[in-house]
Image (cartoon, rainbow, N blue to C red):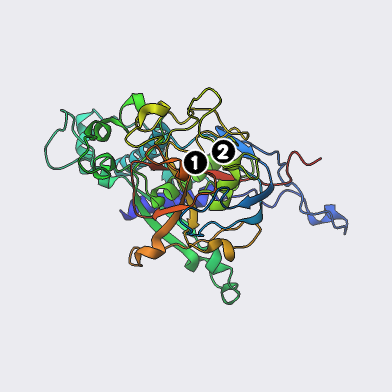
Amino acid sequence: MKKIKSVFFSLIILSLMLTGCGKATWDSYKGQLLGAKDRPAWVPVQPYGMIYVPTGVLHIGPNDQDLNNAMVARSKEVSIQGFYMDETEITNNEYRQFVNYVKDSIAHTILGHFVDASDGSDLQAIDWSKEIEWSDPETSEQLEDMYSKDGIKLLGVRDMDISKIIYHYLWFDWKTAAKLENRWKERAQFFHEENIRVYPDTLVWVRDFTYSYNEPMTRNYFSHPSFDDYPVVGINWDQANAFNDWRTKFWSAYRTQMGEPLLDIFRLPTESEWEYAARGGKKIAQYPWGGPYVRNAKGCILANFKPGRGNYPEDGGFYTVRADAYWPNDYGLYNMAGNVAEWTSTAYYENATQFIWDMNPDIRYDADDSETETLKRKSLRGGSWKDIAHYIQCGTRHWEYQDTSSSYIGFRSITTYLGRDPKDK
């Protein structure tokens, strides 16, 4: 296990390496203030599958009567910095790339597939050029610990022990580090280590519904190719964060190899960023498509939700639908209403609107496993395939515990746009 950790930590260090000081000598400055030389050129890069959401102003809050007078989403004007957002929810096949990467990295580590780090240090990194011969008897014997030990072959296939597919990573606590009393302390003490089991909880399809037959979804939803382009579910908040950390490192390692400057990290959107993106530039839109109704002029339903009591398929989907189903909003984002509710990075407080800042508002709280359930609440947005129309409105707030997964919660990633708004002339 320690060897696995050292490999992941070395990957972290390699991915954070930046361009050196440059070749210029101090004599070349001729005593003038010219700035650091040999800085890399910066051209904004739009990651594949993401949509640019420009900087703007938003009236967060409900656009309909607060029927139960909960007052958890009062209106407030805020400003949001531009960002790139996934045009769809993260799909099963996209998340499978993450699971396969973690699984392969563990196998490579067990098999001893390493190369020396490119920075000349004593660290080692995984040699990804090596192939893993999973069917080879000798290799299979070496990887024995990765397989289930019960001897039972479900559907005739030997199962991988999914509890062993663990992603190790560090995250930096910027909030604590920014406190005045901590400004000169060693940065190492503000890093936190996470060990996250990354495989989706496929049993949510059975557990979420009492007296309901959904076993086919448990057996097939994440594994069968017919659902590759459907949103991944069974992912808790911690797993979504682990995915974004891996995605950041995967992207940054490539850009470092190409000698290109890095982007900001991939992450979950804040609650305000999510609502701003969902409205699609319409400040008081009740739904992402703008109107106050869930049907168009022809009577067609505009999102995947529960349109009537006991009536799930009327909108075209019994459970979830493809992540790019229905028309996108004016930013080009699909299913910002319905299909699956989506995790945000924001901790849930009922009266948050009254005290959050009016610039990029957010409330972050990273609860430990030992803390109370209330502190583990994270904001959900968008509603899902099993929810009524109230929950798919842009301004409706809801929550779930960060360590809970379900058949109706997924996520999408964003990354902050660096530099001036490209539309600003």
* Residue 320 visible in the snapshot: yes
Q: In the image shown, does 134 or 69 lie closer to the viewer?
A: 69
- Where is residue 265? Give x, y as percent: 55, 48
Mark 2 residue crowding within 10 angstroms, few (<14) / some (14–19) / many (20+) = few
**Label 2 sits on what residue type?**
Pro
Q: Which badge, 1 or 2, is on the more N-terminal residue? A: 1
Mark 1 residue crowding within 10 angstroms, few (<14) / some (14–19) / many (20+) = some
What's the mark number on residue 250? 1
Mark 2: which secondary structure?
loop
What number of labels is visible? 2
Identity of the residue furthest to the top in this view:
298
As drawn, 281 above or below 172: above
Report how far apart the C-alphas of labels 1 and 2 lie in the structure: 41 Å
Contact, mark 1 vs mark 2 (Cβ under 8 Å): no
Q: In the image shown, does 409 or 23 lie closer to the viewer?
A: 409
As drawn, 2 above or below 128: below
Mark 1: which secondary structure?
helix
**Label 1 sits on what residue type?**
Phe
Identity of the residue furthest to the bottom in this view:
181
Q: Is residue 182 left or right of residue 341?
A: right
- Where is residue 373? Give x, y as percent: 35, 63
Q: Is residue 333 left or right of residue 230?
A: right
Residue for point 16% across, 28% down = 155
The quarter of the rendered structure image containing the C terminus is top right
Q: In the image shown, does 382 or 130 lie closer to the viewer?
A: 382
**Quarter-of-image position of residue 322:** top left
Residue for point 36% across, 28% down = 313
Identity of the residue furthest to the left in this view:
151
- Where is residue 115? Give x, y as percent: 43, 42
What's the mark number on residue 292? 2
* Residue 115 visible in the snapshot: no
